[in-house]
Amino acid sequence: QNHLENKSALWQNIEVETKWQSAIEAILREKISALSVDEIRHEWEKERPNAKFVLLNNAAQNAPQNDAKKMPAAIFGDHVLNPSTYLKTHVHAKNANIENVLAHWLNGVFTSPDLETALLRRDKLNAEQCLVTPSGDIITRECITFFAPDATHGLLERQQEIEALSIEIALIGEEVAHARETLQTIEEAITDNENALVSHRSSIEEKKSVKH
């Protein structure tokens, strides 16, 4: 057994701006479902899954990835692409290890608002760079890869929905807890009033008895 059942996938550990979810799916492909493990062993070759599968080595994740930080100065050369169009700026990891991996995998990937703009900019790309549109189409100097949804499509969107529901559930839980406290306060006040009423009635009955 590989003991991977309780491992969380990459898509569960990143936050992607809604507009660029298809772009991230197109660039990462099967990597979006990658699982982190402490060790990758050759014995696992005999327990291969029936589909493409990616494992992340935790030791490698911990190693700093400086490529992305050097990218604008190191590989732009004589061509200038705005660093603000770097796809990585639209993705945020939930921990430093995943952040390092994303910086490496998304190095040299730039965004374009549409295919027409990408085609106008493709001559500024070098062999290690590409442009990606919000719809997930990938443009290099040599070719265009049109995006089509696969088995992993929608994972990021569902993760956002799960997180939004979790927040909503937490808020509802707080409201329910507050309502219970309020109800308890009201019930205690009612009990106090009932006790006071009973005491008042008893006092009246005692006074009547004395008069008679």
Image: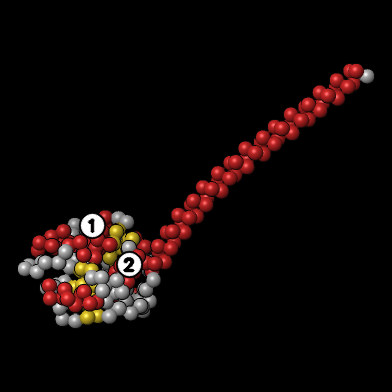
Image x and y of residue 136, in percent: 29, 74
Q: Is residue 108 visible?
A: yes
Q: Residues within 10 Å of mark 1 (few under 14, many from 20)?
A: some
Q: Residue at x 15, y 78 (%)?
A: 141
Q: Residues within 10 Å of mark 2 (few under 14, many from 20)?
A: few
Q: Is residue 101 visible?
A: no
Mark number, residue 19: 2
Q: Nearer the viewer, residue 108 or 62?
A: 108
The tag earlier along the polypeptide, 2 or 1, is: 2
Question: Which amino acid type is shown beneath numbered disc 1?
Answer: Asn
Q: Quadrant of residue 211?
A: top right
**Which quadrant does the C terminus fall into?**
top right
Q: Is residue 50 above or below residue 104?
A: below
Image x and y of residue 33, in percent: 34, 69
Q: CA distance from mark 2 to mark 1?
A: 29 Å
Which residue in the structure is indicated by mark 1?
A: 62
Question: Which amino acid type is shown beneath numbered disc 2?
Answer: Lys
Mark nearer the viewer, 2 or 1: 2
Q: Nearer the viewer, residue 18 or 97?
A: 18
Q: In the image, 148: left or right of 195? A: left
Q: Helix or strand or loop: what does disc 1 sit on?
A: helix
Image x and y of residue 199, in percent: 77, 27
